[in-house]
Amino acid sequence: MGAVETLWKLNIAELFGLGEAGIDDADTDADCSLYASDGVNGTVYKIASDRTFDAFPVARTRSTDDGQPVLKIAVAADSSFCVADAGSGSIVRHNELGESVGELPAPGVISLCRGPEGLICALSSFEGSDQIVIYDQIGTPVMALSAPGRRRARLDPSIANLDCDRAGNVYVSYGMPPYRIWKVSPYGAEMQTWKRKLSYPEDAVLIADIAVDSEAGVLWALLARRESGRQVLDAWSLDGDLLGGSLIPHSSSLFGVICAAGGSELFLLDTSSGPGAGDVVRVSVSP
């Protein structure tokens, strides 16, 4: 892959007049408006393609004894969205105005993504069983797929991620080493495992997030190298071929979330906390 070029940049904390931001997840609607969930402030931020913006308060359903909330989000084409406080056991549905319109039981929910034709996919870990549960447009579970096996006893919701392509295939990453991305088919639950051969110690690499761009036929993986702090975007074809990697230019931001913007463009979101955090950058990646 080639160079990563910055198209524009803004800061959510500055944009919305916040003392600090804590971005957990992001998704886009059919107009490529960006929605970012913030567990620190209990808010979903909408940044439209013309860079106008809005904010929607959302519930944080876990008690403070469970740790800081991690809000996962899935946005439908019509700009309605679902939010799950990871580990809470429920998914809250919101209309395009940000109003809560219902709640789905989802024991052990860890992460969310949108599927084709209004479906919602949830990665859940409950009572020793990991599943990908698929809900229809009215919130009824219609399918449960076995999630990929994992080496670690506990899933970290901040780096356990999934996304879906327009054919309904679900892609999963648990974040921690070793480098693995799984493609799970809804038809017969066939599963592929994608591995990356690395020239540096595998324990030094963390997959912070993944994002599918069905239009371009690419799955992006955001990597952080622990020993250097450098961040890399890997590109995979949806058939599992590694297309290459692109180095993200050095910045003070700590990117932990990516979201496809179409046409080989991506949103990169800073997931650090404290003053100055919360950068959103739209980039293009040349072939």
Image (spheres, rainbow, N blue to C red):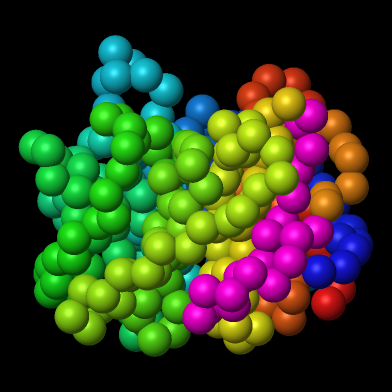
Judged left or right of residue 100, residue 213 is right
Residue 167, how many percent across, how many down?
Answer: 39, 86
x and y percentages locating residue 115 in the rendered image: 37, 75
Q: Residue at x 89, y 47 (%)?
A: 249
- Above or below residue 119? Residue 207 is above
- Residue name at image x 30 percent, y 64 percent: 121
Towards the viewer: 123 or 63:
123
Task: Give, as a single range, the part of the protein colored magenta.
Answer: 228-246
- State which quadrant residue 153 falls in: top left
- Horizontally, residue 18 falls left or right of residue 131, namely right
Which secondary structure is most common in the magenta stretch? strand
- Look at the picture and state if 275 lies above or below 76: above
- Left or right of 276 in this view: 181: left
Q: Is the residue 242 above or below the residue 104 in the image?
A: below
Give 119 or 174, whichever is nearer the viewer: 174
- Residue 143 in view (yes/no): yes
Q: Residue furthest left?
A: 127
Where, quadrant-wise, is the C terminus in this rendering?
Answer: bottom right
